[in-house]
Every structure is written in C-alpha cells, then in structure tokens.
Amino acid sequence: MQGSHFSVILLRKQVTLLYLNFVGRVKQSESEDVMASAYAGRCGCLLRTLHPIQNDLNMQRTILHLDLDTFFVSVERLLDSRLNNKPILVGGTGDRGVVSAASYEARYFGAHSGMPMKMARQLCPEAIVIKGDGGTYSKYSDQVTDIIRDRVPVLEKASVDEFYADLTGMDRFFGCYKYAGELRQRVIKETGLPISFGLSVNKTVSKVATNEAKPNNQLKIDFGHEKEFLAPLSVKKIPMVGTKMFQTLSNMGIKKVKTLQEMPVEMLEAAFGKTGIQIWEKANGIDNREVQPFHDRKSISNERTFGQDTIDVEKMLGLIKAMAENLAYQLRKGDKLTSCVSVKIRYSDFNTLSKQVKIPYTAADHVLIPIVTALFDKLYNRRLLVRLIGVRYSDLTQGHYQISLFDDWDKTVGLYQAMDSVRDRFGALKLSSAGTMNNIKGITTGHNPFNGQPNYIPAHRNQ
C-alpha cells in the first residue's frame, strides 16, 4: 500500500509540473490557445483524480452543459430552408405517433415533445408534420460530438443532442466562459445548428441555466449564486421533476424552487424517500456527479406499437422472434451476454403486463428465442386486442458466447459466426432466419448499443 501511495504522489508531482509548465507558456496563435486550454484541462482533471481532497480545497469545478436547440427541427430546416419560421412537428405521423420535437412556433400553441401527435395537431392545425430520419439526425449529432470532443478535456454525451463537459482547470489559462462561447460559435459555424449552453459548478445548475438561456444563447452562473439563480424558478425546471411529481408538489403548495430550499430535507424524504432528498439537493444547487465519458449499458430492448390493435398471434410471434434474434445479434456484436429475459405486452385498454426469467448467461438465438416465445405465451392469455409488444435483455456482462458441452455443437457456434459476419459486412437486414424474414426490417437499426453513447431514441416514436 505504501509503494502504491508513493507512486501516486510521484505521478501527481509529474502531472503538476506538466500543468504548470504548459499553462505558463507564451502562446503564439489562437490555435495554440485552444490546444493549450484543452491540455491544461486534461492535466487539471487528472490532478483531481489523483488528489480529490486538494481538489475540493483549491480547484473549483467548472461544468459546461450544451444542448442543441429543437435539434430534429433544426436539422430539417438545414435540409429545407422553406421550413424556417414555420410551426414544425417531428415524430410519429400516425394517430398513435408521439411528438419527438416541436419548433418554437408550434410550442406557442401548446404543442411539445412527448405529446401525442394527434393532440399536437389539434392544438396547432397549421403545423407541418415530418416523420423524421434517425440516420440523418445521428449523422449531425456525430458531427457536433466530434467538434466538442476535440476541444474539451472530458466529454459526456447525455443524449443525441445534449452534452456535458468538465472544464475544470482551464480557467487559470484561458477563461472558461470565453472558451465555451467560442466553442459554441464554432459548432454553429461548422454545422449551421443552433446550440445553447449553461456554465456553473455542477451538472444540475448548468442544465437549468442552458434551458433558461434558450433559444440559441448562453448563460453563466457564478460560484456562490446557485441558490439565488434557482430560487425564483418553477419547481418543474428542476431536472427529474416530471409532470406527475410537479402535480404532486403543486398540490402540496410547492410551486417555486425557493419553497423547496426553505423546507427541511427530512420533510421531503418522509414524503418521497430517496427521491425527495435528491430533489432537495438539486433545488439547493448541490450536485456532486462527475462528467462520465462512457455509458455502460445495463440492458437492451426493442418494442413495437402496432398501427392498429391486433389479435393475430402468428403476426405477434413472428415479430417477437425477430426482436429476440436481432437483440441476440447485438449482444454478440458487443461481446455481451444476458442472464435476464423480459417480454412486455400492452393491451388496447393500456393495461401493460410483463414477465421475466433469469437464465444462465448466453447470447445464442436458439436459447433466447424459445424463452421469449414461452414468456409471450404465458403473458398473452386474455385474448384481447394488443397495442404493443416488446423484448428486453438485462443483467448484461462482458463475454463471448460459450459452448455448452451438453446442448450445443461446434457447428452451431460456427453458424452464428458466419451469419454475424454477413450482417457485419452487408447489414443486419441482409440475413435472418426463415421465421423472422417478414418482420426483421421494421425492428433492425444500424445503431450499436454498446458504443458508449446514450440510448438511441427513434425520431418517429409511437405510443
């Protein structure tokens, strides 16, 4: 232990020397400024990792939150300028579609993301409805990600249009607010997409600041002014306070953040448990979460909402087998194994049921598909119209598919390897088992769920 501690001290001294030497250099150009700032920030992040106590005493955190404004709508307007200044709704176009993005012109009439498309159309009849293209949105998201990643020490991609960056350590060299402003202008210049940011000491305050800065603007909350900034805002501005929680708090007479700040934390804990503590901390500007550059997926899933409710068992079984097969391929591609399989059914009356079973770790089609079909058979016993079905694999672990000495053969594993090789080369749509051929197209995407990025949400969701 002593040797390990001594090594950490030596490493910290080396990083400190690099940091002080680098930030003390005389800069020759603007491009050198950018590289110097990013390098100094990386050294600062490493220093905090090696000596967190000193970080608390000497180095104030600086967390940047960036959000692409009405991202899907903005991309559509880049592709077609005739959509500028018009009310736009992006999402599922059928009666069961959900709004994934609404332009500010559409929001004026009350339409917003997450709303049923049918209701949004009623609120804003003149809105232009676009189904959206997930592939196109992902491409633009990746462009923005590349621009930001190359210029910040630590980047967390929270969603397709939302980012956190830890700029701690860069303020001594460049000025974090100035640097963040120049980064934002670079994104706008190189992609044409509007983007807003908030800058503060933690994730929560920065995210709220971004939302207050929108559209297409920026806002910094100085250290020590977090509570003052949050106090006059509605409690629904606090991240993790959704519609139901807001309604509950309102019924308790809590509508402003200031009221939450003045309440004893014990009272909120008694009412909401651990969630109450988290809400109180966020209301008081307390958030010690680190910027996480990698998201480790704990589950993968796929589900389908039917255009019309159905009782066609053969159709549902074919679709659920296709889901199971495609998810198993994703497991093998990511070198993952699952030990928990779940199936979900939502009936036409919105009653939703699910069943799950624990199994030995596997990623094999011939093991998972029978389990999924058996769970479906147990669930679908009401013989009512079905609105939605889904499959989920969870309790994932790293590992290759192993041959069972009793159940499998070498040729089975060889078959999987050959099939996956074809899919990798030509796309997942090009190959499927005979029982899933008619269903694979609707549930297959080119998205890699284990690339460290956040969950992919289709632009044309249905309820």
Image (cartoon, rainbow, N blue to C red):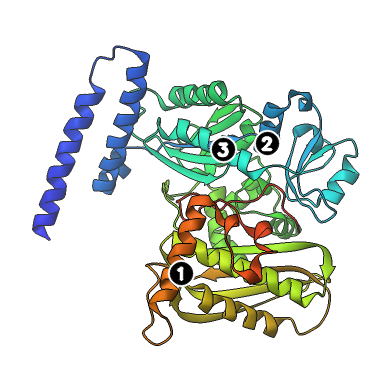
- Residue 59 appears left or right of 138: left
Q: CA distance from mark 3 to mark 1?
A: 33 Å
Q: Label for residue 61?
A: none
Residue 161, horizontal then vertical, whole percent: 58, 40
Q: How many marks?
A: 3
* Quadrant of residue 11 within the rendered picture: top left
Q: Label for residue 139?
A: 3
Q: Amino acid at mark 3?
A: Lys
Residue 270, horizontal then vertical, whole percent: 59, 68
Residue most toward the top? 28
Which numbered disc flags the more N-terminal residue, 2 or 3? 2
64 vs 78, nearest the viewer: 78
What is the quadrant of the N terminus in the image? Answer: bottom left
Relative to 351, does residue 432 appear above or below in the rendering? above
| Residue visible at 31% across and 40% down in the picture | 45
SS class of the residue under badge 2? loop
SS class of the residue under badge 1? helix
| Residue visible at 83% across and 74% down in the picture | 385
| Residue visible at 42% across and 48% down in the picture | 292
Q: Amino acid at mark 2?
A: Thr
Q: Amino acid at mark 1?
A: Leu
Which numbered disc flags the more N-terminal residue, 3 or 1? 3
| Residue visible at 26% across and 24% down in the picture | 23
* Quadrant of residue 276 within the rendered picture: bottom right
Question: What residue does disc 2 label?
Answer: 70
310 vs 191, nearest the viewer: 310
Question: Closer to the camera: disc 1 or disc 2?
Answer: 1
Q: How packed is label 1: few (under 14 Cα within 10 Å), some, or many (20 or more)?
A: few
